[in-house]
Image: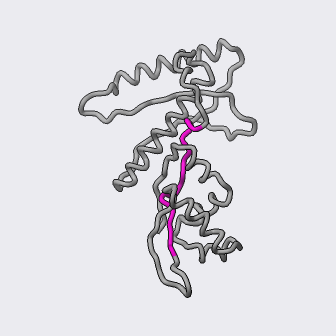
Amino acid sequence: MTQQRAELIEDTERALLALDPLKRRLLDALRVPGSASSLAKAFGLPRQQLGYHLRALEQAGLVRLVQERPRRGFTERVLVAVAGEFVLDPALLGTDRSVETQDKHAAAHLVQVASGIVREVTRMRSAAEAAGQRLLTFTIEADVAFKRPQDFDDFSAGLAQAVAALVKRYAPGSKRRGYHLVIGAHPAAAGKNKKTIH
């Protein structure tokens, strides 16, 4: 019983638990149901020690109980992770909300927008998966290069004009499903795989 959905972690306490190295390994292992006893063998740690960590994860709502069964001298509690993956809300890192009034070319603005995408897409994906649906999205990636600063300005202006013309054909309406389009660019990282749009 693998949990496929993504869980957005929005508070610091749960984030710290999920980021703890041992608890991260436990969450990964508990994509399928397991107990302190079964995990003790795989982890090479005492059952009691793993039980302590599992109780902390359960209290934080990161794992849930699926079965209790009697064993010699104790009750074995079988747990499973509440999600197939956990995504930290970028707001936990203290994104500066004041960038909303800054230049659209500011790196801080791009980071804030990207953070919002992580947060909103994770929430919508989780809701869609809970409803047995697929969240329809698309991603376009490409690499470009500029010789002069003016080339950068010319490209961004041309792209804005092209998008504006296309958006007119697909303007939001009452009988249409709305989408939020974001286009951003940042310097390519060294060794980054090249992507070309054909």
- In the rendered image, the residue lying farthest to the front is 73
Residue 155's x, y, as percent?
58, 18
Q: Which residue is at 64% across, 28% downward? A: 186
Residue 104's x, y, as percent?
56, 18
Q: State left or right for residue 181 relative to residue 157.
A: left
Determine the image quadrant of residue 152.
top right
Q: Quadrant of the C terminus?
A: top right
Residue 19 versus residue 78 in the image, above or below: above
Residue 143 versus residue 82 in the image, above or below: above
**Residue 148 in view in this figure:** yes
Q: Which residue is at 69% across, 32% downward? A: 188
Q: Which of the two residues, 42 or 106, is positioned nearer the viewer here?
A: 42
Q: Which of the two residues, 181 or 150, is positioned nearer the viewer here?
A: 181
Q: Which residue is at 46% across, 41% downward? A: 121
Residue 83's x, y, as percent?
49, 57
- In the rendered image, the residue lying farthest to the left is 175
Q: Is residue 78 magenta?
A: yes
Residue 128 versus residue 144 in the image, above or below: below
- In the rendered image, the residue lying farthest to the bottom is 72
Residue 165's x, y, as percent?
41, 19
**Residue 198 in view in this figure:** no
Q: Is residue 65 magenta?
A: no
Q: Provide the residue span drawn in magenta.
A: 77-92
Determine the image quadrant of residue 130.
bottom left
